[in-house]
C-alpha cells in the first residue's frame, strides 16, 4: 500500500465542509484548527518584484494575486503562456484546506471568519472589465491566494467567469489551478468539469508536504480525482527539512500517477519559498531523474519546469 497516501476515511468523515453561505469563508469544522495555527512568514511581494523575478507561473501568481485583487496579470510563464489571473478569494489571507510547507500565503488569522468573499457577479464583472485591456492572452486562469473551489458559490462563480470569458475572448481557454480537495463535492466537481482545463496539485509525499486539514485527507481526495472529466497533475518537489525527492516518495508518486493516468503532468520546484525556512528547491538534475522515472514506468512524459537554472 502506498505509504504517503492513506486510504479514505469513512464517507461520514469526508469533506465536512458546510457549503451554501453567500458571504464569509466556508464554515468548516476545520476553521478552528486553521485559526489556531500561528501566522508565519510569506509576506507577499509587490507587483514590481513579481514582474522582475524568475519563477513558475504558480509563484508569480502567488505574489501577483495578493497585490492586484480579483484580477491580476497577465502573468507570463513557460507553463501557461500569457495568462490573465482571476482570484476569487477574500483578501488578504490564505483560505485553504492545505498548509503546504512551501506556500507563500499567510494563514487566515483568528477573527477573520467574516471576511467577505467577492460574489460571483463581482468576479464576472471584474473579468469582463479587464479583458478588453488585457492584450494577447493564451489563457484565463482561476487561481488565487488559497483554494478557489472553497468559494461558497463556486458553481455560480464558474458560470460568471465562463460567461465573461466566452463573450470577450471566445477562443481563449479557461483553466483552474486547484488542490482537488473539494472534488468529492458533486456540485464542485460538476463546475470544475465545465472549465477547459483542470490543473490539480498533487505532490509526492503529500501528507508531509501539503499537510491537509483533518477534513480533507489525501486518501479521500485521491479517491475522488478520477471523477473529474480529465486533469493535468502539477507536482512540486522540494528538499530540506521536509522533502519529497527521496526514492520512496518518488516511487509512490510515480505509482499513483500511473494509476490516475492524467492527460498531462507538470513537475517543478519553487524558485522562491514563502513557507518553512528550511525547505529549499530541488536541483534540476533530480527533477530530470524523476521525469525519466515517471516516463519509464508509466509511459507518461511530464513537462519539467526548473526555472532556477535560468535565474540571473
Ligand atoms: S494548496 Fe498549498 S500552495 Fe496552494 S494555497 Fe493551499 S497551502 Fe498554499
Image (spheres, helix red, strand yellow):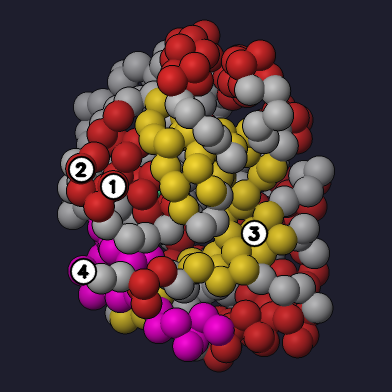
Of marks 3 and 1, the one in the foreground: 1
Q: Real-space Cα distance between discs 4 and 1? A: 23 Å
Answer above or below: position of 70 versus 121.
below
Q: Residue at x 72, y 37 (%)?
A: 196
> How far apart, in angstroms, are the residues tagged by discs 3 and 2?
30 Å
Name the N-terminal-most of marks 3 and 2.
2
Q: Find residue 138 and name its label.
A: none
Q: Earlier in the sequence, mark 3 or mark 4?
A: 3
Depth order, front residue of 107/88: 88
Q: Which SS class for mark 4?
A: loop
Residue carrying label 3: 233
Look at the image and give the residue range highlighted in magenta: 270-288
Task: Report x, y in % for residue 155.
Answer: 65, 21
Disc 2 target residue: 48
* Residue 176 visible somewhere in the drawing: no
Which residue matches tag 1?
51
Residue labelled with disc 4: 277
Amino acid at each position: 500500500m502506498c505509504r504517503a497516501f492513506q486510504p479514505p476515511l469513512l464517507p461520514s468523515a469526508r469533506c465536512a465542509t458546510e457549503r451554501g453561505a453567500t458571504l464569509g469563508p466556508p464554515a468548516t469544522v476545520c476553521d478552528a484548527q486553521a485559526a489556531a495555527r500561528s501566522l508565519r512568514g510569506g509576506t507577499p511581494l509587490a507587483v514590481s518584484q513579481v514582474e522582475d523575478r524568475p519563477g513558475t507561473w504558480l509563484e508569480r501568481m502567488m505574489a501577483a494575486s495578493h497585490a492586484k485583487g480579483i484580477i491580476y496579470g497577465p502573468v507570463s510563464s513557460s507553463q501557461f503562456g500569457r495568462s490573465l489571473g482571476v482570484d476569487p478569494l477574500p483578501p488578504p489571507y490564505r483560505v485553504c484546506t492545505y498548509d503546504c510547507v512551501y506556500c507563500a500565503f499567510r494563514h487566515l488569522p483568528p477573527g477573520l471568519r467574516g471576511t467577505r468573499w467577492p460574489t460571483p457577479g463581482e468576479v464576472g464583472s471584474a473579468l469582463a472589465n479587464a479583458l478588453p485591456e488585457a492584450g494577447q492572452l493564451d489563457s484565463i486562469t482561476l487561481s488565487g491566494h488559497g483554494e478557489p473551489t472553497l468559494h461558497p458559490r463556486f458553481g455560480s462563480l464558474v458560470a460568471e467567469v465562463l460567461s465573461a470569458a466566452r463573450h470577450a475572448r471566445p477562443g481563449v481557454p479557461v483553466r483552474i489551478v486547484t488542490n482537488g480537495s473539494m472534488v468529492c463535492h458533486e456540485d464542485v466537481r460538476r463546475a470544475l468539469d465545465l472549465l477547459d482545463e483542470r490543473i490539480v496539485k498533487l505532490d509526492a509525499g503529500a501528507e508531509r508536504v501539503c499537510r491537509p486539514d483533518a477534513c480533507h485527507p489525501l486518501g479521500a481526495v485521491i479517491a475522488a480525482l478520477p471523477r473529474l472529466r480529465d486533469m493535468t497533475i502539477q507536482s512540486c518537489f522540494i528538499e530540506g527539512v521536509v522533502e519529497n525527492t527521496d526514492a520512496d516518495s518518488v516511487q509512490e508518486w510515480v505509482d499513483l500517477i500511473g494509476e490516475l493516468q492524467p492527460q498531462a503532468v507538470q513537475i517543478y520546484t519553487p524558485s522562491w519559498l514563502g513557507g518553512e525556512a528550511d525547505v529549499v528547491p530541488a536541483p534540476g538534475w533530480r527533477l530530470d531523474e524523476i521525469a525519466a522515472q515517471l516516463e519509464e514506468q508509466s509511459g507518461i512524459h511530464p513537462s519539467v519546469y526548473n526555472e532556477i537554472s535560468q535565474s540571473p
